[in-house]
Image (tube, helix red, strand yellow):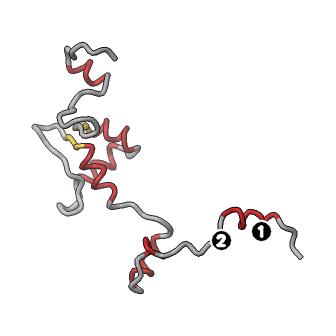
Amino acid sequence: MSDRPVKDRNEAQRFGTAGNLHGLGDEYLTLSQLAAYSKISARQLRNYLALPPGQALPCYRPGRKVLVRRSEFDTWFARYRQRGKPVLARVLRELGLDPERLPDTRPPRALRDSAEKAPAR
């Protein structure tokens, strides 16, 4: 990409510079751009916008357009991160244990692989 100034909005969108008001990585995205970025359909993103205020995807609505700041989406989406089976994590929390802080009790991968390859006696 050249260092010449961007002349029109279409050119800015082609090169991904539209909406970049707060530095790299923190741009405003339309729902179609956010769908491409997140691999979540625009329809599902609209469902996330309609959730109750404490759970809804944060957005900006200048006129009829819906814009989402990339960094705010990343923060909102990180709340839904899970590791392992959700039911197991829930049971561990009910027992007063933090699933994120449990030690890994599995043997190292090399030992597991050799145990699988060894003939049964």
Write down the residue under mark 2: 107
- Say which amino acid is labelled 1: Ala
Report whether 24 appears left or right of 41.
left
**Label number found at residue 79:** none
- Whichever of labels 1 and 2 marks the residue nearer the N terminus, that label is 2
Quadrant of res 17: top left
The residue sitting at the bottom extreme is 95
Report whether 62 appears left or right of 55.
left
The foreground one among 74 and 66 is: 74
Give SS at disc 1.
helix
Q: Is residue 64 depicted above or below 53 in this figure?
A: above
Q: Is residue 71 depicted above or below 118 in this figure?
A: above
Residue at 23% of width from left, 57% of height from top? Answer: 56
Quadrant of res 92: bottom left
Q: CA distance from mark 1 to mark 2?
A: 10 Å
The foreground one among 50 and 38 is: 38
| Percent position of residue 28, x then y | 22, 38
The residue sitting at the right extreme is 121
Residue at 29% of width from left, 38% of height from top? Answer: 25
Number of callouts: 2
| Percent position of residue 54, x then y | 19, 63
Q: Is residue 74 depicted above or below 101 in this figure?
A: above
The foreground one among 5 and 38 is: 5
Report whether 38 appears left or right of 55.
right
Write down the residue under mark 1: 115
